[in-house]
Amino acid sequence: MNRIITGLIVGAVWLLLLFRGNFVLFWLTIIVLAALALHEYCSMMVPSKGKQFSIVGIAAGLLPPIAAYTGQPSAVAAGLFMSLLVLLAFTLYRYGSLEQPIDFLIRLIFGAAYVGVCSAHLTLIMARQQGALWLLVLTAITVASDTGAYYCGSFFGKTKLCPAISPGKTVEGFIGGLFCGVAAALAVAFYFFPGFNVLKMTVIAIILACFGVMGDLTESVIKRSAGVKDSGTLLPGHGGILDRIDSVLITAPILFYLLHFNFFSGA
């Protein structure tokens, strides 16, 4: 029950943010979500280093989503480079106190790219024409594919998808998630994008649903390496922020670049 209630509340807030908020509020919200996700990531990846190290990791990782305010992917790339410079400088400064400096540096650089850069693309999408509607499509695909995979896997799942990473995921659940993701994308597009290209929307829904699973598995790898079940406890019944946005972190950049390079032109 906690899972359902939390999901409904989060969904309602997200829809209000998309269609009743403004761009600045959305940008600030993404920064807050990225900060929370980075905190969870640093707690898992550098748990023994102390608050100072986590603060640096969070601050560096926030530079790309902050730069996304411009709506330009080049600014996000510059933000990532600044993240690299900050983390390099801090690693050199604290080199003597680090047992494995390169391991520490790689972990935080990955966090800045995985959480910081990927979350920044949500803001980049919002900055585009009809950005809120495209984010709604992305949300519909992600939620529907996750839900479809869960229930299809629960009722029909027999063949393990990636047992070494996530024993609960099944091929049957994956296929069910694809069908639900496509259906959700077509339903949203039918209502908000009259005359859309069904084939293109179907293809992109399949692509995003597949990469959404990759995002989920990526976070599972992180949690397994840290020896934890959930990234956090902020969301009752769901775990942490990173547990909820893992799929979107991978799919948002894909959707943005499909839009950026006019994949949907003539749709």
Image (tube, helix red, strand yellow):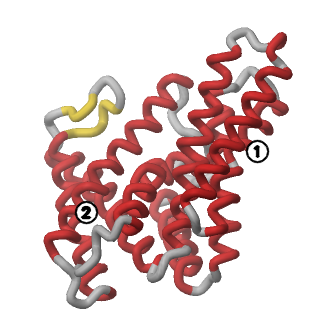
Q: Quadrant of residue 206?
A: bottom left
User: Which residue occupies 26% across, 55% down?
Assistant: 207
Residue 126, compared with residue 217, is above or below; it is: below
* Secondary structure at numbered mark 1: helix
Mark 2 vs 1: CB contact within 8 A: no
Decide if residue 240 is in sight here: no
Q: Give the amino acid at mark 2.
A: Ile
Left of 154 or right of it: where is 37? right
- Is residue 184 shown above or below 148? below
Q: Which residue is mark 2?
A: 204
Residue 206 located left or right of residue 8: left
Within-10-Å neighbours for mark 2: few <14, some 14–19, many 20+:
many
Q: Is residue 217 above or below residue 185?
A: above
Q: Tell how many labels.
A: 2
In the image, what residue type sits under mark 1?
Answer: Ala
Name which of mark 2 and mark 1 comes first in the sequence.
Answer: 1
Residue 84 position within the rendered picture, expressed as x and y whole percent measured from the top left: 68, 36
Residue 222 x/y as whole percent: 50, 31
Say the numbered circle drawn on residue 169: none
Label 2: state its secondary structure: helix
| Image-based side of 218 in relation to 145, left or right | right
What crowding class fits label 1: few (fewer than 14 Cα within 10 Å), some (14-19), or many (20 or more)? some
Which residue position is annotated with label 1? 59
The residue shown at (47%, 48%) is 246
**Residue 136 falls in which quadrant of the image?**
bottom left
